[in-house]
Amino acid sequence: MTRYILRRLFAMPFLVLGIVTLAFLLTSVTKGDPLTAIVSDRQMNNPEVVAAAKARWGLDRSLPERYVIYVGNLLQGDMGTSFITRRPVAQDVLYRLPATMELVMAAMIVGSVMGISLGVLAAAFHNTVIDHAARVFALFGSSIPVFWLGLALLYVFSVQWGILPGPGRVDPRAALPPAVTGFITIDSLIAGNIPLLLDALRHLILPAFVLGWAVAGTISRLVRANMLEVLGREFILTARAKGAGEFRVIVRHALRNTMVPTLTVIGYSFAYLLTGAVLTETIFSWPGMGSYAVEAARGLDFPAIIGVTIVGGVVFLITNLMTDVAYVIANPRVRLG
């Protein structure tokens, strides 16, 4: 396993370089003019202002020159400066990434627990009321649009009943703790601010459930299908013949053998949600990577677009590596080649 991990880590920089190259080329050949995000409409007809803006942002150089300069700066940790915020892209990403990570991790915990539990129950009580109810619940989670579900839950639990807070990571009047990790829940715990911790957890409930339900629907259907297949195999019959209890047969023998494909879905969902939770972050005013990507695309903020692409690619590569390692932990018969 050590050799496998080292080989994957050695190849990762080359894969990241490929992602950077592709993202740079795609943003360079687009028909949009990035000057519209830099120069005001009134100054676009002023040749001197346009020329100065091009020289300031390096847009007067050829594509190969800009690529070499960008890669050189990237190796030093410089991802460029955002056209819109006028701040370093790395600074914007470091500010927004923890917010998305906090939301996605909470959503994956909710989705994984719900999905695996529903899938196991549906398979264990095949063709019963429990099975049908679990399948309907999973179908709703995968079918209901995220924006509709988010707005509906906000209206019911926040506006009508008032038992959960509205959008945002914490109450707007709350003082944020000193930034250590960027996770408000962890930072408030480090600072010993329990009321703020509880407030942050309450703000996490609705957006995490909205994202987690969609993931739970996919996971539960996969677990159910694989469990039904595994429960009919010979080693399950042997375990039951030896007198093993039904709970032990399902959890230790059947579930463990269904975890390899399930881990694939969980890993992919985690990587996808980091940059794909746009609607949820917009509805719940969550200042994360998804909303940042949308703002960058809308304003033709090329440095920010490339920065988000790089971060998403790196997270996807790391998630795939962790998923492969988790295969062996979940099923020792799997050997990494």
Image (cartoon, helix red, strand yellow):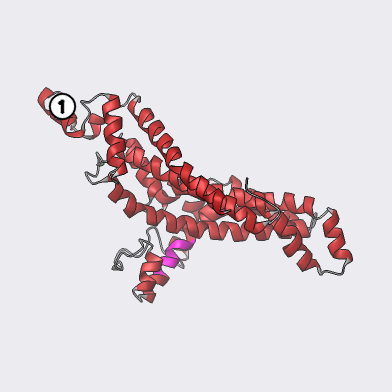
Label 1 sits on a secondary structure element that is helix
Residue 194 appears anywhere in the view:
yes
Give the quadrant of residue 213: bottom right
Residue at 38% across, 75% down:
195
Residue at 47% across, 65% down:
161
Q: Foreground: 329 or 241?
A: 329
Pointer 1 residue: 50
Is 201 one of the magenta-colored residues? yes
Is 90 one of the magenta-colored residues? no
State whether residue 119 is above or below residue 62.
Answer: below
* Quadrant where the image shows the C terminus: top right
Residue 285 appears anywhere in the view:
no
Q: Foreground: 8 or 251?
A: 8
Give the quadrant of residue 293: top left
**Residue farthest along the left direction in this orientation:** 48
Locate residue 330 relative to residue 90 in the image: left or right: right
Locate residue 85 relative to residue 49 in the image: left or right: right
**Residue farthest along the right direction in this orientation:** 241
Q: Magenta region: which residues? A: 199-205
| Image coords of residue 133 (percent x, y) | 71, 56
Residue at 66% across, 49% down:
261
Locate residue 122 relative to residue 22 in the image: left or right: right
Residue type highlighted by circle 1: Val
Locate residue 299 relative to residue 283 in the image: left or right: left
| Image coords of residue 332 (percent x, y) | 68, 57
